[in-house]
Image (cartoon, rainbow, N blue to C red):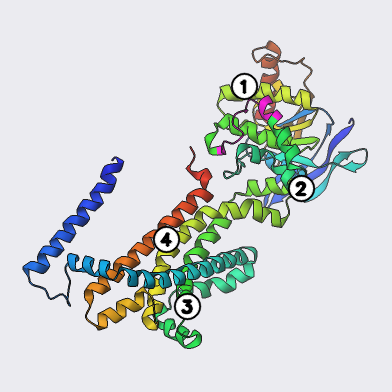
Amino acid sequence: MNRLTSIAAPLALLLVLLAVWEGSVWLFDVPHYILPAPTRIAVAFVSHFSSLLGHAAVTLAEIVLGLLIGGLGGFALAVAVFYSPILERALYPLIIASQMIPVFAIAPLLIVWMGYGLWPKATVAALIAFFPIVVNASDGLRAPNEETVELLRSLGASRWQLFWKLRLPASLPTVFAGLKVAVTLSVVGATIGEWVGARRGLGYLMLQSNALLRVDLVFAAILMLSGLGLLLFGGLRIIERRVLHWRGVE
Amino acid sequence: MSGTAIEVRDVAKSFEDVRVLAPLSFAIEWGAWSTILGPSGCGKTTLLRILAGLLEPDEGEVFIGADGRDVATAYLPQRDTLLPWRTALDNAILASEIEGSSLREARAEARTLFDHFGLSGFEFAYPSQLSGGMRQRLALIRTFLAHRELLLLDEPLGALDPLTRATLQDWLLDVWGELHKTILLVTHDVEEGLLLSDRILVMSARPATIVHEQPVGLPRPRGRASAELAEGKGSLLGLLLEGR
């Protein structure tokens, strides 16, 4: 399949779906506060663009902060668990159990503890994002084979050098795989944080518009949020290609 | 340097209940190319890892040194150990980087070796872009650049096709002649041993001992098709089969 069809095919499908949606709304005369037509959403999107952008900036800050905390924390935890078998045995069940707790259950508590600002949302995003990073980084740190470790040791490498020159670079491919999962999850995390209590952000906008029966604005906010997610994912892929430059060559 | 480079005295090693090395002893001279021949899975790699200081023997002693001082070895493991995220040049200078010595000097030296080893033009290629033979040459450059007097090579040409293998054998011999290193090669290829070494030690199957030792007196370069080589090959193969 060439490049043109790989872009044109999903676009065509999207257009067909939108056309069916638009047609159905007109045909069955669905009220706009139940399901607005795509054209109505587009109008809302354009007319509220600057406000959407303002809310998006808040959500973006929460996501990026959450990713940074979750990513660095997750990686540090993976390293700690890698070097300490006792810590691994103690922590792993807890880490996995923590993933069974719905973030919805802790989000209100975080608001109580941290207030209405940026931090509780970033924390929710971080809590969701850290798990794929821990799991993937742990795998990556174990990736080098025994012979390579021995070779470096025979050259006199210290534990520190083994980490910097071997385990860290070897873990990057899986760390990036984890980050890609974490990006999409942290978008959800930040939105949940905003639903529970916020004064700004796309999640807040969705909730407010829903209460005002402005379903077109809810959809416009969702559209903006998806765009934000795509942008973050794309940015991460560009960084990944730069850092893992050696993987692309053949 | 002259005299004894490695002396192995009654070294034994077991992994769990499997005795890999029965007490075995041998000695290796400085400046010589010695080859240990043995059947697959006989414990050759275990022996090399003990010599490289990566493994402690259960019994016996190992002396590596000259004039009463210890000498560090450069060990080349059997499996591919190039770092895929480093360019060829950066892989080559790994030892200098770990030692903390000048990288500029190491790079300059590596470049001359790249020319010498037929790798010039590939300094900035990644290992995945190199052929099997080139990767192996790069791994050998890295071993040479560790600046150790004694090189321990674990079947460095084992995974290559016969033609590449023959080319690299000739080339390795050239480099050895120029760099004045002491080499201990481990292989199961009888012809390779006869073609390259000054001395051959034959190892038996597990639990391994040295069952035979012989100098290879043939003048270099040795022809692969020569009658002497064929003769030596026959008798060594016989010994390997006996020791199995």
Residue drawn where x is 82% and y is 47% of the image = B60
Residue drawn where x is 79% and y is 36% of the image = B150
Query: Pointer 3: residues within 10 angstroms few (<14), some, or many (20+)?
Result: many
Q: Which residues are magenta?
A: B112-127
Q: Nearer the viewer, mark 4 or mark 1?
A: 4
Residue drawn where x is 37% and y is 60% of the image = A230
Q: Tell me if residue B22 is in the magenta stretch.
A: no
Q: Nearer the viewer, mark 1 or mark 2?
A: 2
Name the dominant secondary structure of the magenta segment.
loop
Tell me the SS state at disc 3.
helix
Query: Pointer 4: residues within 10 angstroms few (<14), some, or many (20+)?
Result: some
Query: Looking at the picture, how far across and down is residue B151, in whole percent?
Result: 75, 35
Chain letter belonging to callout 3: A
**A223 relative position to B235: left or right:** left
**A150 relative position to B57: left or right:** left
Q: Specify which label sits upstream in the sequence, 4 or 3.
A: 3
Q: Give how far apart the Cα atoms at labels 4 and 1 are.
A: 52 Å
**A70 relative position to A8: left or right:** right
Q: Give how far apart the Cα atoms at labels 1 and 2 are.
A: 36 Å
Residue B198 shows up from this direction:
no
Q: Nearer the viewer, mark 3 or mark 2?
A: 3
Q: Which mark is residue B100?
A: 2
Q: Give how far apart the Cα atoms at labels 2 and 4 are.
A: 39 Å
Tell me the SS state at disc 2.
loop
Q: Which residue is mark 1?
A: B166
Q: Nearer the viewer, mark 2 or mark 4?
A: 4
Q: Tell me if residue B124 is in the magenta stretch.
A: yes
